[in-house]
Image: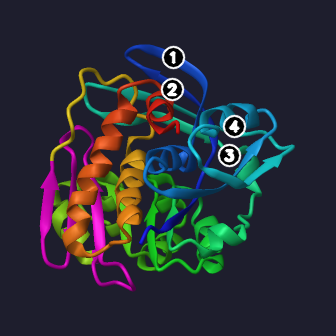
Amino acid sequence: MTWGIAVGGTVSLDNVTTPGGLRSEQIGGSAVYFALAASPVATVHLVGAVGRDGVDAANAALAGSGVDLDGLEVSDQPTRRWTATHDFETWQTRRDERADEGVYTTWSPRLTPAAAGAEMLFLGSMHPLQQLAMLEQSSARFVGSDSMVAHIGEDSAGVEQVATSSDILFLNRAELASLTRSDPDGWEDAARSLIGRGRLRAVVVKAGPLGAALVTAGRIAALNAHPVSRVLDPTGAGDSLAGGMLGACAAQGRVDDEFLLGALDAGLRRAATCISAYGVAALVASSAG
């Protein structure tokens, strides 16, 4: 049985610098990358907010994907802006990161009936109070979530509450270390320490060009990243990984531990697609129905 997925997260206009140069005002955000990555195989209901200055770009990116946009609120406030420089030598992909939250400063998520009733929920990176507000409105049987070092530093208790209210958590090594107050090199033990807290039963530890690892109570399984001829823009890779993975789960209506590892490989494939072009261009091309 195919499941529907509700995704809540940011819709933003990104100013991204890579070795290939600066790309200004390109549409992005955790909800957009996730939705485009999952949409080829699952019905996705997007919940987010965008200003009138960004709505045309958002609609253009998502128009051919089949993503349900009834939950995308259009505001007179400005669209969220995100700025970062990607360093391809150290793979510190968010050096000089900063955000102007715009509409997300005051936005409170309101799930449509379709989003509230979806069998799966993904809480993209945003303030934990907004993630918790989505959780309260959802009847999902399986919940995934993500976060950022900035949110963990601002409200670690809120992030922990979101994590322990989720079935699967997606974090990179730096985020995991920040949440568990541990050394990034000890990511295996850090991830294991979270399993069994609340409803949390799996952690995906993202490692950029090294791939990702699935940590459950029974095992740690690492998978390599899928190769691409040239990395152009790693923005959104983590959200694309989550979208591809949970999309694969939703398409089969399966979230058992045996299935999750193959689903993670599907997520890594979508991440590879994402980073092969600037912004969402490659995901848009592969998601058009």
The residue to which callout 1 is attached is 22
The residue to which callout 4 is attached is 59
Q: Residue at x 56, y 45 (%)?
A: 32
The residue to which callout 3 is attached is 101
Dot 2 falls on a residue whose secondary structure is strand
Q: Position of residue 83 (x, y in %)?
A: 56, 32
Q: Amino acid at mark 3?
A: Glu
Tell me, yes or no, whether the two marked residues, 2 and 1, touch with CB atoms within 8 Å. Answer: yes
Q: Amino acid at mark 2?
A: Val
Q: Which residues are magenta?
A: 194-223
Question: Farthest residue in the top direction?
Answer: 21
Q: Earlier in the sequence, mark 2 or mark 3?
A: 2
Q: Which one is nearer the viewer's eye here, 21 or 95? A: 21
The CA distance from mark 2 to mark 4 is: 20 Å
> Which mark, by number, is residue 80?
none
Q: Amino acid at mark 4?
A: Asn
The CA distance from mark 4 to mark 3 is: 20 Å
The answer to whether residue 249 is above or below residue 224 is: below
Tell me, yes or no, whether the two marked residues, 2 and 3, touch with CB atoms within 8 Å. Answer: no
Q: Earlier in the sequence, mark 2 or mark 1?
A: 2
Q: Residue at x 58, y 75 (%)?
A: 135
The residue to which callout 2 is attached is 16
Classed neighbour count for the residue bearing mark 1: other residues with Cα under 10 Å, few (<14), some (14–19), many (≥20): few
